[in-house]
């Protein structure tokens, strides 16, 4: 079976915000956010290569951002140890949360976009109620033994990856914590679309597909280079392909079942491709390398099966 692979560059966004630290699609994949080393977050329509708005409020590099489900708010975190909640329409910073003791690596809204979860180099995940006027976290998850590098959230679970080599899954329905020791520092975690598995990137140039309930490794993906940096991996909208950035200027694409590299997206650069954002319903992906963001789409007109 052939997959529709995003294999050609549709647009290149020259973000003009220093190094782009992260790129994220909006909930409907119509817009995207870019996080810059110039302390800014920018909003784009990547399908038309159209810049829309700049959000300022951080005192240092912005490392991650996430849009709310209705596209009305943005949360972001960065090296100033701060989590900021922005209003999309006005561009104003509505809240600034300063309780972390170190760089904020990752931020996510919960399913209802009422709580922001932030993971930090201070080894904690903090939860912030966006509807409250208070500036203290409503909960602190402090089980990690090293910096929290990645967070994923579902309707009833929080999945975290840490530099201590573990992934932790908090099941909010039953109030339980499940820990799987992966080995090397974890740089990226994500759920598969069916919610049965976790995709985990490690700083030993491996990506592992883990059974969520048993902790068993189902498959391993290699060929890319990831030994120094925090690099994203993700699945396509059909759970059939695995994508990962790499320290050699490419994005590697594997077949989920066969674990073979089926394509590489060459960015014509020796710089690390570290951030990825897959489209939620089409064979399309955003990638960040140096100061630019690339939108890749499939050149196949219709699917082969």
Image (spheres, rainbow, N blue to C red):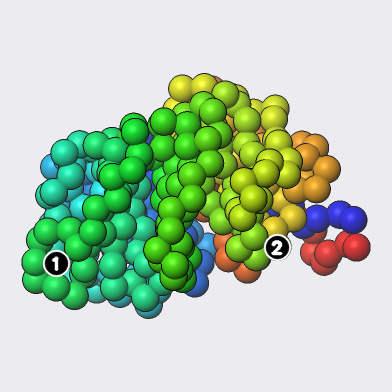
Q: Is residue 180 above or below residue 286?
A: above
Q: Is residue 125 visible?
A: yes
Q: Mark 1 points at which residue?
A: 94
267 vs 135, left or right, is: right
Disc 2: which residue: 238
Residue drawn at the location 86% of the way across and 54% of the way down: 2
Identify the secondary structure beneath mark 1: strand
Residue 260 placement, left or right of 227: right
> Where residue 22 sits in the image (x, y, percent)?
40, 45
Which residue is depicted at the point 41% across and 31% down? 163
Q: Looking at the rendering, which quadrant does residue 70 occupy?
A: bottom left
Question: Residue 172, position in %: x, y?
Answer: 41, 66
Q: Looking at the image, which is closer to me, 163 or 59?
A: 163
Question: Which secondary structure lies at badge 2?
Answer: loop
Nearer-the-camera pick, 19 or 153: 153
As displayed, is residue 191 above or below residue 174? above
Q: Can residue 15 be seen in this view?
A: no
Q: How far apart are marks 2 and 1 (CA)?
A: 36 Å
């Amino acid at each position: 079976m052939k997959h529709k692979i995003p294999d050609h560059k549709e647009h290149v966004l020259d973000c003009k915000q220093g190094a782009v630290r992260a790129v994220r699609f909006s909930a409907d994949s119509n817009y995207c956010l870019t996080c810059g080393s110039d302390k800014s977050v920018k909003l784009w329509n990547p399908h038309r290569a159209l810049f829309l708005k700049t959000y300022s409020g951080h005192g240092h590099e912005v490392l991650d951002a996430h849009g709310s489900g209705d596209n009305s708010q943005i949360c972001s975190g960065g090296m100033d140890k701060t989590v900021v909640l922005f209003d999309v329409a006005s561009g104003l910073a509505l809240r600034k949360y300063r309780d972390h003791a170190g760089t904020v690596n990752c931020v996510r809204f919960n399913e209802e976009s009422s709580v922001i979860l932030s993971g930090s180099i201070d080894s904690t995940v903090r939860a912030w109620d966006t509807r409250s006027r208070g500036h203290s976290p409503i909960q602190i998850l402090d089980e990690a033994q090293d910096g929290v590098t990645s967070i994923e959230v579902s309707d009833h679970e929080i999945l975290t990856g840490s530099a201590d080599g573990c992934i932790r899954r908090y099941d909010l329905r039953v109030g339980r914590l499940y820990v799987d020791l992966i080995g090397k520092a974890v740089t990226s975690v994500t759920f598969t679309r069916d919610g049965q598995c976790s995709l985990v990137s490690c700083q030993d140039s491996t990506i592992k597909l883990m059974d969520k309930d048993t902790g068993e490794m189902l498959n391993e993906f290699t060929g890319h280079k990831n030994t120094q940096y925090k690099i994203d991996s993700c699945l396509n909208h059909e759970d059939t392909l695995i994508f990962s950035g790499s320290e050699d200027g490419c994005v590697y694409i594997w077949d989920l079942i066969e674990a073979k590299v089926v394509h590489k997206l060459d960015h014509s650069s020796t710089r690390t491709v570290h951030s990825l954002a897959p489209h939620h319903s089409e064979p399309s992906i955003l990638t960040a390398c140096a100061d630019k963001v690339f939108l890749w789409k499939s050149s196949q007109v219709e699917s082969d099966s």
